[in-house]
């Protein structure tokens, strides 16, 4: 497979949340290959160190994204190291399964903190530099789980549906500063975690039947959409959803 190069990304400072594995790791790799300076935040110390060692121009900070002061401190440390960011990718999330009958208020709040809350506070921390710099690109990673009316994780699906509201309102608030805000909407992406936990032969066959395309989706294709939206090629794209789900219904 041959992919596009985006000269406008070379030398830009990019921040990615959840960059040590899965979709986030492909996003980090993709930006590094474009010549960007990439900083990411993750909780996985070993995975983060391996990612940074394997790719030029990549650095990281360890933080639990549920802890907003820790997120703010990590972003400040990356800014000190890399300079103001021109691109923010709010990627981090966990689609843990849960039975609606067993959800407690505490678990619900924890799922919102894991899958939604940190996105807003990352934008709040980074957008002021983008305003001073005359523009930027923010990409929030959503999910098509709620579009498909998928069951088995009501708190996750609710948080991911709210990502679209966050994108739309922040696109309006920041648009006058030429800051673009979009949502990338992955379908069922074949990360190692998905393969280990849920990708049984029966589940895969059922999912193929729901897709228009017959191939399972590699994380690299989500990363490629993120790169496009961060580049100058997408200069007139904002406040919208960009699906990477093989036509899943």
Image (cartoon, helix red, strand yellow):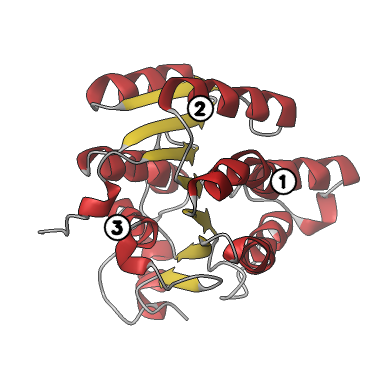
| Secondary structure state at the residue bearing disc 2 | helix
- Tell me, for residue 249, which label it has, or none: none
Question: CA gap, disc 3 to disc 2?
Answer: 25 Å
Please determine whether, in this image, residue 165 is positioned above or below residue 59: below
- Closer to us: mark 1 or mark 2? 2
- N-terminal-most mark, 3 or 2: 2
Q: Give the percent coordinates (x, y) of residue 173.
A: 68, 63
| Nearest to N terminus: mark 3 or mark 1 | 1
Q: Residue at x 83, y 56 (%)?
A: 101
Q: From the image, tell me which residue sits under label 3.
A: 224
Q: 235 or 112: which is nearer to us?
A: 235
Instruction: Please indicate whether residue 229 sits to the left or right of residue 33 in the image.
Output: right
Residue beneath the point at 74% across and 48% down: 112
- Classify residue 86 by image quadrant: top left
Q: Which residue is mark 2?
A: 79
**Marks 3 and 1 in Cβ contact (< 8 Å):** no
Left or right, 88 with reference to 12: right
Q: Residues within 10 Å of mark 3 (few under 14, many from 20)?
A: some
- Residue density around tag 1, few if under 14, some if 14–19, many if 20 or more, within 10 Å: many
* Quadrant in the rendering for residue 50: top left
Which residue has dot 1 on it? 117
């Amino acid at each position: 497979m041959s992919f596009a190069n985006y000269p406008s990304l070379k030398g830009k400072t990019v921040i990615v949340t959840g960059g040590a594995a899965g979709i986030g790791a492909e996003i980090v790799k993709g930006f590094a290959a474009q010549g960007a300076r990439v900083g990411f935040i993750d909780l996985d110390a070993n995975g983060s160190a391996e990612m940074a060692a394997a790719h030029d121009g990549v650095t990281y900070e360890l933080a639990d994204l549920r802890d907003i002061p820790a997120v703010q401190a990590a972003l400040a440390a990356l800014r000190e190291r890399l300079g103001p960011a021109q691109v923010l990718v709010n990627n981090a999330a966990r689609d843990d399964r849960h039975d609606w009958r067993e959800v407690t208020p505490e678990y619900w709040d924890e799922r919102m903190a894991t899958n939604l809350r940190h996105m807003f506070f990352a934008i709040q921390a980074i957008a002021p530099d983008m305003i001073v710099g005359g523009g930027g690109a923010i990409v929030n990673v959503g999910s098509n789980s709620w579009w498909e009316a998928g069951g088995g994780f009501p708190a996750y699906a609710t948080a991911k549906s709210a990502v679209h509201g966050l994108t739309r309102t922040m696109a309006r608030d920041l648009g006058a500063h030429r800051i673009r805000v979009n949502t990338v909407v992955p379908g069922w992406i074949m990360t190692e975690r998905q393969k280990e936990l849920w990708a049984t032969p029966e589940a895969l066959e059922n999912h193929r039947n729901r897709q228009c395309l017959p191939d399972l989706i590699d994380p690299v294709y989500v990363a490629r959409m993120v790169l496009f939206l961060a580049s100058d090629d997408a200069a007139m794209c904002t406040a919208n959803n960009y699906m990477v789900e093989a036509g899943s219904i």
